[in-house]
Image (cartoon, grey):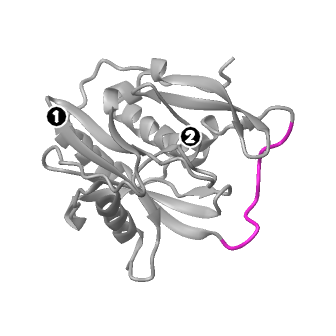
Amino acid sequence: MLNIVLYNCSAKKLRMHQFVDFLKKRLKSDLPGGEAHQRMMAQRIGGDFRMNHTRPPRKGAVMIALYEEDGKVFFPLTQRPDYDGVHGGQVSLPGGKMEEEDVDLETTAIRETFEEIGIQIERQNVIGALSDLNITASNFIVKPVISFLAEKPEFRRDPREVAQIFTAEINHLSDARTLKETELTVGPNIRLRAPYFDIEEKVVWGATSMILSEFVSLINEYKNG
C-alpha cells in the first residue's frame, strides 16, 4: 500500500505568467519542505535506511527550468549514465556541485544547467528556490532553484553527464495517478520500498522525487487558490 498523502488533481488551468507571479511571492515565505520531502522518502525493507552525514556535506544546486509550449508548462529532467556511483542511471534535475568560482548556488544551478543540457538561463529569469535537501547518500546539501524561460529551449546534451533529456508537464506531475510505489535494490543488497513519480514511463524516485514533491505542493496551492 502507498502510505503517503496523494495529491489532488484540480481543474484550474495553470497559466505560465500567473504561476510565475505566484511562485515569486510564495517562495519568499515558509515552505513545506520537510513534510513534502518525507512523503517521497524511500524506506528500507526490514531495517532502517536513515543515514547521517559522516563529514561536512558539500553544497550543490539543481534547476527546475519552466517553459511554455502549446499552452502547457514543462521543465527538463535528465537521466544519468550508468556508473558505479550512488546515483548512476537515476533521473535527476540538471545541476551539480558548487565550484570555487560560483558566487552563489544560483550561479551553480545556472552553470550546471548550461553544461549538462545546453540552455542558458539569465539571472533575471530566476524565480527563487525551494527548501534545501540533505542527500546523505552522496553527502550533499542541494538547493533546488526555479527559473522560467521565455520560449521552449533547444537542448544540447553533454554525453559524459547525461544519457537522455526528457520533459515533465506540470499538470501531469500534479496528477495523483502519476504517483506510484515500487521496490528497488541498491548498494550491497539493500531493498527499498520507494514512492516515485511515473514521468514518461521513468521511475523518478529518491532526492529528485523529494524535491518534486515540494514543488507539487506549491502547484496544488496555486491550482486550489
Residue 53 lies in the magenta stretch = yes
Q: Amino acid at mark 2?
A: Ala
Residue at 63% across / 52% down in the picture?
A: 86
Is residue 46 rendered to the left or right of residue 82?
right
Q: Residue 128 in the image: x percent, y percent?
A: 35, 58
Residue at 53% across / 43% down in the picture?
A: 90
Is residue 126 rendered to the left or right of residue 90?
left
What numbered label is drawn on residue 36?
2
Q: Earlier in the sequence, mark 1 or mark 2?
A: 2
Hey, which residue is sitting farthest bottom in the picture? Answer: 101
Image height check: is 131 above or below 210? below
Magenta residue span: 47-56
Residue 194 lies in the magenta stretch = no
- Name the image quarter holding residue 22: top left
Q: Is residue 6 visible?
A: no
Is residue 39 rendered to the left or right of residue 92?
right
- Quadrant location, the N terminus: top right
- Name the image quarter holding residue 223: top left
Q: Amino acid at mark 1?
A: Glu
Q: Secondary structure at mark 2?
A: helix
Answer few, some or many: residues within 10 Å of disc 2's Cα (few below 14, many 20 plus, some between 14 and 19): many
The residues tagged by marks 1 and 2 sit, at their Cα atoms, a distance apart of 28 Å
